[in-house]
Amino acid sequence: MTDFDPAQHRMISEQRWFEDFVLGERFVIPSRTQTSAVFAAFQTASGDTHPVHYDVEYCRARGMPDLLAHGFQTLVHTAPGAGLFPYIVEESLVGFLEQSSKFLKPVYAGDTIYPALEVIELVPGRSTGVVTLRSTVFNQRKELVLEGMQKFLIRRRPAT
């Protein structure tokens, strides 16, 4: 293969710009079961050592069926980089502007969560625009466990 070009080695070949987004467009992020390994990795990364997140007997003594996931442990699965969104805006992404979340139901060890992002607002500017994504996480029982939003500053298509 003599015509290899590293610049063309991309997950998504066609880049998108602000005006390419449409309201209601969804970006699904792969599902993930909240295993003990996920809990341990989050504990290591966060430094949170409260037993509600890492001691099954502590949880059971308080009426919980298993380890309770930290809210941020659930939130982290809405990171756009876990899906295709950042790959389609590699050339147009200026920055991550804002994030907020509501934690609606508990997530326990063994739960499988299903994150997604949906375009809910497009605010054009002169050379950029703000893309607002609604973030959601459902569990295997089809319950909405997290809802929030994320805002990104995206360049408009360059003049040709």
Image (spheres, rainbow, N blue to C red):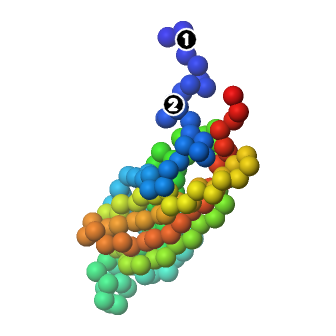
Mark 2, secondary structure of its residue: loop
- In the current view of this chain or complex, which residue is farthest to the top? 2
Q: Which mark is residue 82?
A: none
Residue 152 visible somewhere in the drawing: yes
| Residue 37, placed above or below residue 69 | above
Q: Residue 147 falls in which quadrant of the image? A: bottom left
Identified at 45% across, 81% down, the residue is 51
Is 43 above or below relative to 29?
below
Distance between the alpha carbons at the discs numbered 2 and 1:
16 Å
- Counting residues from the start of the chain, the first of labels 2 and 1 encountered is 1
Seen as rendered, the residue at the extreme bottom is 62
Residue furthest to the left in view is 141
Q: Quadrant of residue 67?
A: bottom left
Point out residue 11 in the picture as x, y percentages from the top left corner.
49, 35
Closer to the camera in the image, 69 or 151: 151
The residue beneath circle 1 is: 3
Q: Residue at x 37, y 85 (%)?
A: 58
Q: Nearer the viewer, residue 125 or 8?
A: 125
Which residue is found at the position 69% from the left and 28% from the top?
Answer: 160
Quadrant of the image occupied by residue 20: top right
Question: What is the secondary structure assignment of the residue under circle 1?
Answer: loop
Which amino acid type corresponds to the residue marked 1 in the rendered image?
A: Asp
Q: Give the image location of residue 155, x and y in percent.
A: 67, 45
Query: Residue 54 location, x and y as percent?
Result: 42, 75
Tell me residue 72's x, y (percent).
51, 70
| Camera-side residue of 86 and 156 | 156
Residue identified by numbered label 2: 13
